Every structure is written in structure tokens, then in C-alpha cells.
Image (cartoon, grey):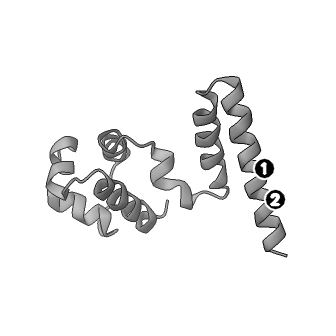
Amino acid sequence: MDYVILGKNIKKFRQLKGLRQIDLAEMCNCSDSHIGQIENARGIPSLDTVVKISNALEVTVDQLLKESYENPEMVYLKEVSERIGKYPVSRRIMACEGLMHYLDSLEKFSQ
């Protein structure tokens, strides 16, 4: 596990939620200095703490670790699939068509 990536992602998601380290620490039943150590990759959290942090930040453990994976795009594909799956059929088709157009543009301009 890459603890630098884990720490950066925890900090990113914490800041996106507008939380201070002390706020997250209280939600996870630990000290703010422990959260600071985790965010700066100076402390190694237990699996239990990582799960508490992900629950407090309302993200998955995958989202906190995805850059550490060999295939991080699989996390994104799962998230995209889940989001698209919530739409009615007509909107799912529109979303897929929009994604296909975007991919066509990427391929066209990356040549």
C-alpha cells in the first residue's frame, strides 16, 4: 500500500467536505495528530482506521487507494457504471453516447 497516496487522498476528500483534521479525528475516534501523521505518510493507519476514515468522508476505501492499484481505472469504471445505472434507460443511452463522443475527441486529438 502506498501511504503517501492514501494520505493525500484522505486530505483531499477531507478538504472537499470542509472538515478540519480535528473534525475528522472526532468522527473516527482518534487524535488530530494521528490524522495529520496519516495525511503526511508519517503514520500507518490500521485497516479499521482506514475504514472509519472512508465512512466519515463518505467515500470508499477504493477511492482512497485507487492510484495504488495496478488498474486504477477499474475503480472509476465501477463508479461510472453505478452512477449511470441510476438513470432511466433514455438518460443511460445519452450518457453512454456522450462518453463515446468524448473518447472519439480524445483519440482524434491525441494522434
Quadrant showing the C terminus: bottom right
**How far is disc 1 from disc 2 in space, using C-alphas?**
6 Å
Residue 96, x across and y down, in percent: 73, 41
**Where, by quadrant of the figure, is residue 69 drawn?**
bottom right
Q: Is 13 or 25 nearer to us in this picture?
A: 13
* Crowd tier of the residue under label 1, counting other residues whose Cα lies within 10 Å: few below 14, some 14–19, many 20 or above: few
Q: Residue at x 16, y 62 (%)?
A: 33
Residue 98, x across and y down, in percent: 72, 47
Amino acid type, label 2? Asp
Q: Could you tell whether 23 is left or right of 90 in the image?
A: left
- Residue hosting label 1: 100
Q: Could you tell whether 78 is left or right of 3 in the image?
A: right
Up the image or down, 64 lies above or below 110; here it is: above
Pointers 1 and 2 in contact (C-beta within 8 Å): yes
Q: Could you tell whether 93 is left or right of 74 in the image?
A: right
Q: Residue at x 55, y 60 (%)?
A: 68
Residue 47, x across and y down, in percent: 38, 45
Q: Residue at x 30, y 54 (%)?
A: 14
Q: Secondary structure at mark 1?
A: helix
